[in-house]
Image (cartoon, grey):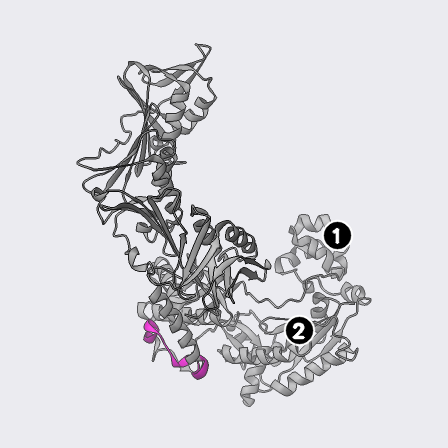
Amino acid sequence: MRTVLHVDIDAFFASIEQQRDPRLQGRPVVVGNGVIASCSYEARRFGLKAGMPLSEARRRCPQAVILDGHAQVYRCYAERIFEQCRRLSPDVETYLDEAYLELTGTERAHGGDLLAAAAGLRRAVQADTGLTVTCGLGPNRMLAKLAGKTVKPDGLAAVSEAEAEAFLTARPIEQLAGVGHAHARTLRSMGLTSIGDLRALPVGTLEALFGSPGRLLFERCRGRDTAPVSAREVPRSLSRETSFHEDTADPRLIEGMLEYLVGRACHACRERGLSPRTVAVHLRWSSGESAEQSRTLPQASAVDPVVLALARELLARLDTRRVTLHALGVTLSQFVVGASEQGALFDEPEAGRRAALCQALDQVRGTFGSGVLLSGRALHLKGRVRRDRYGLVLRTPSLTQ
Amino acid sequence: MDLTIQQGDLAFAVGRALGSVQQKSTQPLLNCVLLEADAEGLRVTGTDLDVTTSVRVPAQVRTPGRTAVVARHFHDVLRKMPKGGLTLKHDGKQLEARYGDGKGWSKFPTPMAEDFPRVPELKGETRVQLEGDTIARLVERTAYAVSEEPARPQLQGVLIQGDAKQITFVATDGHRLARAARKGAFAEVSKDGVIVPGRVLQLVSRFAQEATSPVEIRIADGKNHVGFSTRVGEYQVQVSARLIEGPYPNYEQVIPKDNPRSLGLMRTDVVDAVDLVASHADSNTNQVRFSLRGGAFAVSSATADFGAGEQSVDAEYSGDDMEIGYNARYLLQILRSLPTERITVRFKTALSAGVIEPVGALPQAEEDLLCLIMPLRLPDAVG
């Protein structure tokens, strides 16, 4: 029988902030910029939730402590928690603040009691990081996650295959994986409010309503989910973005930030042994409008100057409006794994030196922290953007892969 | 215009002229071929402004004249007409073709031919002659290596150089290079050479193979145009094109002089092995690995998505152990272009250019061929 464990870090960013600053404990804490990225359970009592605009959060809960957040710190915490997870199972699929563990076949290693193993994991995480996690055990990913949802925060629950149907029947339709706002509205308009109600629809109707994902919903509302737990070695894309501390039209600041973001993104690629083929730059102006353009490199490359040259070209094509810029981002995608860079006949010495330089920079940053080196145009950011050991302290650090 | 012509002659002329007509041009006249009849016969011309092909075929012309007709459609209909004589008549509005001894007729609308681009005349030019099959071989051995990147237009062409001893065709995209030469006195072409667009040479190569007289290459004095002309039986074919502006990179500088490690291989063995093993390679990088260990040689490839494979190939190698990565596509194109069965690959390091050459005399003793390929920088490669 299959068993999947879902681990969810409770109020992830907010809990870390409360840990780091004891004065925040017991108070409503919100992390985010523009919108709530994460909020503590104290804040949730006021009706705050992720995705809510900060202005509304302030109105609902004037006493809330609102913080910009420390992306690097969160990443370190998450990595430590995922490290604990990997002790339980070799198959761990991690996200920003949650993980799926395939426990099938590990029963003997855990003495036959997977519930106890999950409880042990919760204790280990608490001892190691001081954070609480909620664990859900189920016969597949979907049920494991839903089981956890019922006991949040700081809980542990299990749903067996036999209980699955009864467990699902009364749950509201929104809780089914794959049903978002739009689908929920459609289904509610048809008088379908619980997952059990959905079972009345034949597969053809669901497919007609939602296309091919309809077939998935048909399976899922019956508690069936065959998606495997697999560590995604290759992310679909990797982005680094930020908004400026003040909207700006200063080309030195904009290009400096572009160079810095490209450097960070390329570094992240190299760390993972990936080379992107596609580079995208996106802008958001203070007027609220935004634009994005992408281009493909002739050869996949994670070398800063190669990616930067293309990114600068894209920026020049995009930044044509006479409005100050609010935010800037770089997204790399279409990765080639373990790509070896194609050697070049005519500028080989330069390409070789560039690769060696990147390697040297990575080593220096690995030893002394990302903040110790700034390149070229990014120097314009010096003195204008705060810097710490982890690099520049960006206003809206990217928290995703 | 009023003339009688053999269906086969006209189909040949229109088919060849079609070679330089674009698939779909925004300028309606560029979708056409120009038909010009005079006392000597019929000339059919197609152009996309960069490349012009014109073919002169015999015809009994009663009234001279010129008209344009939509190339692809005219060719499609023409091919279906019965063999034998057909008469073409243009009354100013449409072109009438009568075929099968008056049994059938077709009429084609004709746009105004006045604005059809003029075929550039090559003035005060340099002329050299080469046998058709020689040109076809030189093109076949080099043109695959031209670049498709618009960023470096010089590399989108083949460099043709000459001196007192030989004529040389060179093509490279910066990752691989092919240089094919033929002995002879070609000092007229000049050492600096001219850069001919790759697709022009592909067109030239097609009729050079069937040429019944040597192909004449003419380079205009300003070095902005080149013309290739020859006879195919009774037909006169000419391709003229705009040259690509240089300078061409100094390729001689990147040909390694001292690659001490030499790997002797049978060409078909290694082609088969690379082709098979590359099925496991990433479809973007096509990365295959050459492993030289203890005198044995193997080709391998591995990816998470497509699995892994390795094949040993008989080889003569007596250097140090080494691992080199290559793009299989580049490698196969080079290997398939080599005319001899025995070949050598000479390396220095896993990061520097490898030289691939035929061993022994080429089937045509007065010809010469050398190919370069840059490795892929393997993560474990040692410089």
Tell me if residue A370 is in the magenta stretch. yes
Could you tell me residue A222's position as x and y percent? 76, 59
Tell me which secondary structure the magenta stretch mostly adopts.
helix
Please tell me whether residue B79 belongs to the stretch shown in magenta. Answer: no
**Does dot 1 land on a helix, a strand or a loop?**
loop
Which residues lie in the magenta part? Answer: A366-380
Chain of the residue on which disc 2 is drawn: A
- On what subunit does the disc labeled 1 rest? A
Q: In the image, which is nearer the foreground, mark 2 or mark 1?
A: 2
Q: Which residue carries the number 1 mark?
A: A201
> Is A209 left, or right, of B205 in this rendering?
right
Q: Which residue is mark 2?
A: A90
For image coordinates 46% across by 65% down, the residue present is: B318
The reply to whether label 2 and label 1 mark residues of one chain is: yes
**How dense is the environment of label 1, judged by Cα within 10 Å: few (below 14), some, or many (20 and up)?**
few
Residue A102 % position (x, y)? 70, 70
Q: Is residue B154 left or right of residue A333?
A: left
